[in-house]
Amino acid sequence: MINAQPGILAPVPGHGRFMEFVAAPDSDIGLALADLRSVGIDERTVIGFGPALFGALGQTIDGLRPFPGLVGPGCNVPSTQADLWCWLRGDDRGVLMHEGRAVENALGPAFRLDRVVDGFKYDRGLDLSGYEDGTENPTGNDAVAAAIVRGSRPGLDGSSFVAVQQWIHDLEHFEDMDQDQRDNIIGRRLSDNEELDNAPPSAHVKRTAQESFEPEAFVVRRSMPWADAIGEGLMFVAFGKSLDAFEAQLRRMAGEEDGITDGLFRFSRPISGSYFWCPPVADGKLDLRALGL
């Protein structure tokens, strides 16, 4: 039996609300987090905790660390590490708005809402560039093996680590390119989603080929497009049994290995970045033993 939060392995929903919180100074975060144990956890809600919360409670989670800020040739990857993350999932944006208000009220004065982004599923699961997102996602038992901690101890088994970034696209610039240029940025043909044999080394598919790392860097992506008054882009979400696989991909994208920057940076850039640990569940509630609660 997998005691992971069900929304981690569930398919991407029609709508999502991504909420990031920061702890208020001198607040009783332990009491606020203990109150979260009363919240039912099903496919509609995924919750994660940032590294600072564990330090404040005198606890540690091996492998949990702040999101790294990176600078590469022509790219900047910011760290905006938050303390608590909530991903609400469903089919009705209005319902998610009200559920988000309930989460914010439950956390009370101990946490302040710092970022909220409403995502949505585009067509069959496309990025707003028109290309399919997450083609190489592992499925079934492979997804469990990639995303869920197993063989550890009670309170950790069933947990997962997640990397969350908000990317903003320059679609006008992207659409000014001819189709071959766009395909070479992604490394796949838009027409049939087939990988290009002769794609340049900067192609996103080549930069992030999960089996090309040592060890292999498989993650389970659950990203969703977003669009609002400031622009549009992708809420990138990647779950893993550790943060190492995602970070290996990110560092290669930024050109740390060979000075070659991922083609995505030609039309898109991240404006946030955080790491979180998503606790397991027990009897439909968050299992917070690792937090000492």
Image (cartoon, rainbow, N blue to C red):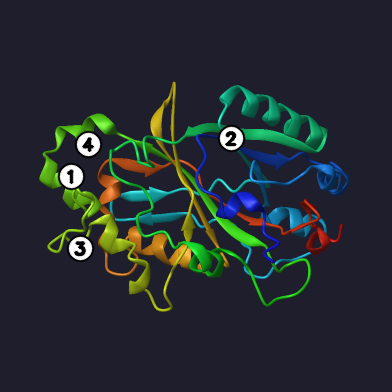
50 or 258: nearer the viewer: 50
User: Label 2: how many residues lie within 10 Å, few (<14), some (14-19) or many (20+)?
Assistant: some
User: Label 1: how many residues lie within 10 Å, few (<14), some (14-19) or many (20+)?
Assistant: few
Q: Amino acid at mark 2?
A: Gly
Q: Residue at x 57, y 25 (%)?
A: 93
Tell me the distance, in whole angstroms, between the alpha carbons under discs 3 and 2. 38 Å
Per the image, the residue denoted by label 4 is: 174
Q: Quadrant of the N terminus?
A: bottom right
In primary-sequence order, the first of circles 1 and 4 is 4
Picture layout, residue 48 above or below residue 89: below
In primary-sequence order, the first of circles 3 and 1 is 1
Pinpoint residue 5: horizontal percent, then vertical percent: 67, 54
Pinpoint residue 170: horizontal percent, then vertical percent: 29, 34
Tell me the distance, in whole angstroms, between the alpha carbons under discs 1 and 4. 16 Å
Q: Nearer the viewer, mark 3 or mark 2?
A: 2
Per the image, the residue denoted by label 3 is: 201
